[in-house]
Image (tube, helix red, strand yellow):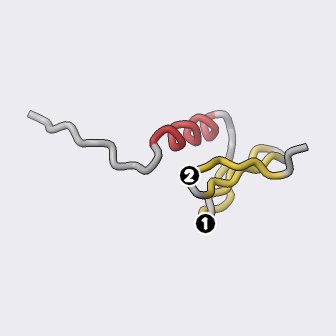
Amino acid sequence: MQEQKQEQRYLPALRAHIDHLLGKGWKIIGRNPLQLRNGTRTYLVMHGMLIGEGLH
């Protein structure tokens, strides 16, 4: 019988949202801090928050 392992990822909802963005074509362009880009839009992940850059 296989044991169920407890989720060990930090902030699983944020991770799921980032996975969703990656599935929609966003690209990881940096890892410390994590940076995502889609066209001219860039997001940073800092202190457990997804932060948009250059919002107009």
What is the secondary structure assignment of the residue under circle 1? loop
Q: Residue furthest right?
A: 56
Does residue 40 lie above or below 13 as drawn? below
Residue at the spot 69% in from the left edge and 43% down from the top edge? 26
Image quarter hosting the C terminus:
top right
User: Which label number is shown at residue 17?
Assistant: none
Residue at the spot 43% in from the left edge and 50% down from the top edge? 10
What is the secondary structure assignment of the residue under circle 2? loop
In this picture, residue 28 sits left or right of residue 2: right
The residues bearing labels 1 and 2 have C-alpha atoms spaced at a distance of 13 Å
* Residue matched to label 2: 48
Marks 1, 2: nearer the viewer:
2
Judge the density around disc 2: few (<14), some (14-19), many (≥20) Cα neighbours within 10 Å.
few
Give the quarter of the image for residue 5.
top left
Judge the density around disc 1: few (<14), some (14-19), many (≥20) Cα neighbours within 10 Å.
few
How many circles with numbers are drawn on the protein? 2
Give coordinates of residue 8: x percent, y percent.
34, 49
In this picture, residue 43 sits left or right of residue 34: right
Give coordinates of residue 23: x percent, y percent.
60, 35
In this picture, residue 32 sits left or right of residue 43: left
Amino acid identity at mark 2: Gly
Does residue 29 lie above or below 11 as drawn? below
Residue at the spot 62% in from the left edge and 63% down from the top edge? 33
Is there a contact, CB below 8 Å, between mark 1 and mark 2? no
Q: Residue furthest bottom?
A: 32
In this picture, residue 9 sits left or right of residue 38: left
Give coordinates of residue 12: x percent, y percent.
45, 42
Amino acid identity at mark 1: Asn
Image quarter hosting the N terminus:
top left
Disc with the residue nearer the chain's start (1 vs 2): 1
User: Which label number is shown at residue 32?
Assistant: 1
